[in-house]
Every structure is written in structure tokens, then in C-alpha cells.
Amino acid sequence: MTGLPLIITFIVAIIVMIVMISKFKIHPFVSIMLISLVLGLVAGIPLTDRVLEDGTKVSGLANVIGAGFSGTFSSIGIVIILGALIGSILESTGAALTLADIVIKLVGQKNPVLAVELMGWVVSIPVFCDSGFVILNPIRKALVKRTGESSVAMTVGLASGLYISHVFIPPTPGPIAAASTLGIGDNLLLVMLIGFVCSLFPLAAGLVYAKFIGKRVKADDEMNTEEVVKTYEELVAEYGKLPSGFSSLAPIVAPIILMALSSIASMAKMSGDFATLISFFGTPIIALAVGAAFAAAQLYTAGKMGDFYKICDDTLKTVGPILFVTAAGGVLGKVISASDMVNYISEHANVLSAMGIFFPFLLSAILKSAQGSSTVALTTTAGIVAPLLPILGFTTPIQITLVCMAIGAGAMTVSHANDSYFWVVTNFGAMSPDRGYKTQTANTLVMGLAAILEIALLSLFLH
């Protein structure tokens, strides 16, 4: 199956999957894998590997599913494990409470949602949003206990800040790749500046929606009455003396600095042994391993190394379901990529080109919703739009930068079951999938629409 029928089938499949998970309570892993298999069969992906007449090798459905599953594990699996381990140690030593105090002193106790949103927005400039959420989640949880703010509101606020800079501001790879494809790779400073400006509307929209939905949806940890009735002072008393600010920050700040340095080195096109070393330590896996080493040192200083084995064991038990559901989402994305859907959308892009600045947004949103990855949506849409820029009337650097921003806005619209970030946010935020649709999915729709509104307004004045 190809063309429009395939797109309609995909939409129906997503609806069926959501109903299976939310209404019939079928486990997300089973639901996503089953829908992926059926969609792959309907899309006409061959059952076994084939070699076409031109020598092109086409993977069979079983290998496509395997590649989607393993690809997700290789890209984010170890990151989730190490990040969760850091978080567990920070919680066990009381360092997370120290970090919460630091944030409260900087922003004020009356604005915890804004605090985590801005914290996520800054951190995600050099760090992938998935990694950023895992790293910052202990601070979010501690702030919930410290301020009494809604756990859901704090989750949505943190996820919002991380996601916005992830799609708008270099040196995150997606915006850099899109800018280069569009021919403004040498104007990354302009892209960063406009990215900052274009963050304003979605930041405001994310903050408002976080506070709105936080009053209507509860997370699992808010339903645990034993945890809710404990005051912040009682929690501190359980730990005795809390770790210092430096000791508490090191496991989180060290990975961020390492990944930021790697991004800067890449953007500056540095070479040589030192650049190679920076690049190595800046990869998310190694950077988080360094953070885990700092956390282990903190555990040793607190005299709790005897708990390290149990902490590791409990962490692996916690992240196991997250990893498998996330990998299932990767399978769905891979099946979509292996089908003819993306090619069909690309070939018929001229139908949408009359929409001006809304065209790259809509195309990117379609690709994002279809295959799950914001980075893929950014890069693919940029490749489609680049040759159409003169036709669309976008010729100056500032106009093309706004096109890049419109693609970024589409690349966040929307995050659902085939997006690994959806599962990271919902699982670490202690929410079931149906609550994830009401929070993460709905919020990314609100932010995406707010972003394209701001970009459309800017396009009226910036030429």
C-alpha cells in the first residue's frame, strides 16, 4: 500500500493503538509492537530481505522491527540507565533536596514550574531533551516535595523547556542540520538568536498549560499518601546533614558541561587529539558515566557505599519497563520510515507550498507525528523545503532562518507513542499513557501552535 491510503491507514492505526492502551488497558509494549507489525504488513514491507534489480537491498519486516528496537536501545538505552542511576544516588544521599534549595533561592518558592521550565530550556541547548529530562528529574521531584507544587505541572514544565530549545537552538544537532541544509549553516549565531526569540511564545504556552493540566491530572506519586503527607523538613531530617551544593551539582553539571564543550568543538570544527578527547567525553553515554562517577563519589563521602549494589539493582528494575516501551516506540518509527509514507509526502510537497511560512511547519508536523523523531522531522523537512525556498519567496538569511524555526515548531508537534521522549516524560513523571496524551501530547500541540503563531508574526516584520 502506498500514497494517501497508507497515510489514512497510519492515522487509523494510531487511533487504534491509543484506544488499546487507554481504554482496554493493553500494555503499551504489546500495543505498539502489534500495531507496528500490522502496519508493516499493510504497508507492504517485504517479509524477508530482498535485493531489487538496481542492486538496492530492502530489509524484511522482521529486520526492520529488530533494527527499530535495537536502534533505540543503542541511542538512548544506556543514557536512561546512567541518568536514572545518578538520580537514584542523588535521592538516596539527599543531594536532590540540596539542588531544590538552590533552585528555590534563584527563582523563588512561588515560581517552581517556571524554575524547572527555564532550567530545562537552558540545559537542553547543548543536551538532547531525553538525556536532559533524565538528568534533571531528581531536581524536579525534590522541588515537588520542597514546594508542594503539582508533580504533573512540574513534569510538563520541565518537559516544555527541554523540548523548546531542543528544536530551536543550536548546538542541538537537529537545528544545526536543518540550518545547514537550508544554506544558513554559516549563520548559526543568527539562528541561535532567532531561536531564543522564537522560544518566548512556546515557553509562555508551556507554562500556562503546565499549571492548567496540573490541576486536572495527578501523577502516581501524588496518589501515594505516605509520600504526600511528609513535609520538606521531615524529609531533610531523614538524611541528617545534606551534601554541599558543589557535591550535589557535580553529577548533573559535569555531563552538561562535557556535552556542551563537545557541541562547541563540533560547531567550531576543531580537530586534533584534544578535539577528539572532547568529542569522546561529550558523547551522552560517556558524559553521563562521568556524572555517575561523581555521584558514586558522593555516595562514598556520605558513607553509603554499602547501598550501591541495591541502588543499582533497584534502578535497573525501574528503568526496565521504560526501556522496553521506548524501544517499542522506536520500532513504530522504523516501520513508518521503511514504508512509502515519507516518500509520498515529499513527492507531493508542492501541494502545500502555497501556505508560505505555514508550509514548512505543517510538513514538519506531519513527519514528526508520523515517525516520532524531532531530529528526523527537522532534517527531512529541511531537505524537502530547501529547493523550494525561492518559490516560497524566502531568500534572505533572516527569512530562511524563520523557515528553519517554522520547521522546528513543526518538529515538536506532536509528541506521542512513537516518540521516545513521550515515554521518558510519562514514565519518569509517573504517569500512565492516557495521562501522557493529556499532558505531553496535548502540551506539544499547544506549544507548537504558539511557536508558529509567533514565527508568522515575526515574518511580517523581519525580512
Image (spheres, grey):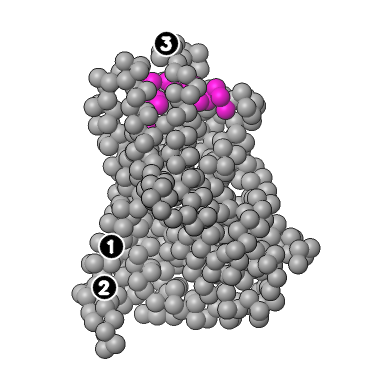
Q: Secondary structure at mark 1?
A: helix
Q: Secondary structure at mark 3?
A: loop
Q: Gap in Å between the C-alphas at discs 1 and 2?
A: 10 Å
**Residue beneath label 3, please?**
240
Q: Is residue 54 magenta?
A: no
Question: Looking at this rendering, what residue extends furthest in the right direction?
Answer: 461
Q: Nearer the viewer, residue 302 or 367?
A: 302
Q: Earlier in the sequence, mark 1 or mark 3?
A: 1
Indicate whether 417 appears above or below 82: below
Left or right: 315 in relation to 98: left
Indicate whether 442 appears above or below 316: below
Q: Nearer the viewer, residue 295 or 378?
A: 295
Q: Secondary structure at mark 2?
A: loop
> Do the residues under discs 1 and 2 have CB atoms within 8 angstroms?
yes
In this picture, which residue range is highlighted in magenta? 86-103
Give the residue type that dot 3 points to: Gly
Q: Position of residue 326 (x, y in %)?
A: 35, 51
Give the residue type that dot 2 points to: Ser
Q: Which residue is pictured at 25% across the width and 61% down the height?
A: 66
Crowdedness near tag 2: few (<14), some (14–19) or many (≥20) residues, C-alpha within 10 Å: some
**The label number, if any, that marks residue 59 in the structure image:** 2
Indicate whether 127 appears above or below 113: below
